[in-house]
Amino acid sequence: MTNYIKYRIYEMLPGLAVWTALTAGVILSFKSPLVIIYFIILFDLYWVFRVAYFVFYLLLSWRSYQTSIHTDWRARVQSLGPRANKYIHCIFLPVYNEDEGVVRSTLDAIAAANYASDRILIVLAGEERQKGHFESFAARVQGDFEKKFFGFITTIHPKDVAGEIQGKGSNLHYAGIKAKEYLDVRGVAYEDVIVSAFDIDTIVHPSYFACLTYLYAQHPNPTRASFQPVALYNNNIWESPAPLRIMAFGTTFYLLFAFGRPELLVTFSSHSMSFKALVDVGFWQNNIVSEDSRIFFQCWLKYGGDYEVVPMYLPVSMDTVSDPSLKKSIVNLYKQQRRWAWGVEHIPFLLWNLPNHPEIPLQKRLHRLWAQWEGKFSWCTTSIFILLFGRLPLWVAGDEVRRTVLFQNTPHILDWLMFCSMAGIVFSIVLSLRLLPRLPNSRRKSDWIFMLLQWLLVPVSLICFSALPALDATTRLLFGRYLGFNVSQKKRANYTAHPDTIITSI
């Protein structure tokens, strides 16, 4: 068996597992409806326990989040003494077709942070595919900001490089090499450089770099750790359609939930890490879509499992994929969720590489693999199981089954279990209101009502903008229809979220 065929089999396994489960459920609904009725009752009961589990860890993380945003991180950094001044923050900002205003608002937030900006290196990374657009403002932006920072360099990632997937990962890979050259000339030790890879629309919390510096300095082995902030999507949340807001909050809450189990945490979107680790693994992979989470697995394997993600209970705020056109916003959301679900590509990667790392305990390897596989499987199937198999066997069951006590009571049992699971939505509603930034002057106070009513769309959103794009991504991998990197279109109105709005309403 050639390596290509073996890897293709690994790529097919997640999709085969998902479609086998869905197909078997449909067939059994007709052939043995009682079996599916028993299954869905047990599954819904399991779901209620999962919701309780989710709320428990979300509450723990929320308390840590509240503590962190009210902590004087600058004072903590000063308590480190002279060693706090040796660290340099290298911030990668990949750009594609974003407006100059978006770039400037991100740089303004970085410059305004409660941290010495002369210890910050900016890497503004453009694409040759959009060279004209990038060069139309890059020099002007660099001229306005470079005196505020330790350094400011711009890079242009060449297009059509053999073996690359055009996208954020390949851009970051190229920019990382250029940053290494810049630091080498100045003799900066890699261990003293803390990297942050941000989406270009990222607005950092004012204490972000102070908190990051303190956590890095206090970590017993900081070059073996990534640092994950809380991802908010507050920049344009008030102008975004309801489905985008629901999925944005869902992403934030899932990340907070994951913080409660750091042993399984993986980097997501904007994150930070040691430059030494980045160099050791050869920078971000340039031939995949999910570079933000793959960089963790690169490091985890490189260091024989001795690598972790440290929860950082401070927020960074980004844009939702909103567009003035509702239709385009919906399409953008679907594509964004599908791109995130393309993280299913980590499963064949792990299946291929884990046998080559016997230094990692078998239980630890299997735990990581199971976490990825179960997570992607549940992403594809949970909402469909609840919706489809909670109804289909009841519709197609024969008279003999319909006369059973179980059949007659199943709708009431399922309704009661779903009512219990509503606790998760209620808790999410409360937290979402606490996380919202100030209402812009351009919006009406009645918009608060829509922020509440939008949660009625949760069942539809979970199917259309969670399960279906995840199923789409998994099926594409099954048939070898590889997903390229689609750029999320993000447009704002005339206002821009100031860093203070991240925490004002909390």
Image (tube, rainbow, N blue to C red):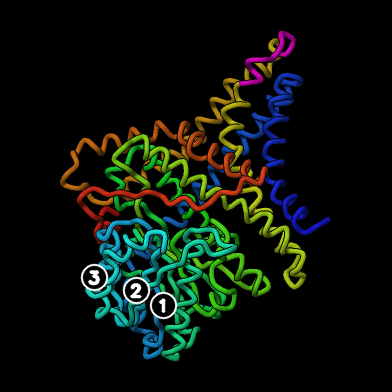
Amino acid at pointer 3: Arg
Residues shaded magenta: 392-401
> Is residue 292 placed above or below 45 in the rendered structure?
below
Q: Quadrant of residue 197?
A: bottom left
Horizontal and vertical percent for residue 307? Answer: 60, 71
Residue at 48% from the left image edge and 74% from the top image edge: 176
Horizontal and vertical percent for residue 190? Answer: 49, 84
* The N terminus sits in image quarter: bottom right
Q: Which mark is residue 214?
A: 1
From this viewpoint, is residue 315 visible? no
The residue to which callout 2 is attached is 73
Residue at 58% from the left image edge and 44% from the top image edge: 473
Horizontal and vertical percent for residue 362? Answer: 76, 64
Horizontal relation, residue 184 to residue 74: left or right: right
Horizontal relation, residue 474 to residue 456: left or right: right
Which one is earlier in the sequence, the residue at label 2 or at label 3? Answer: 2
> Is residue 8 placed above or below 217 in the rendered structure?
above
**Disc 1 to disc 2, C-alpha distance:** 7 Å
> Is residue 154 placed above or below 325 in the rendered structure?
below
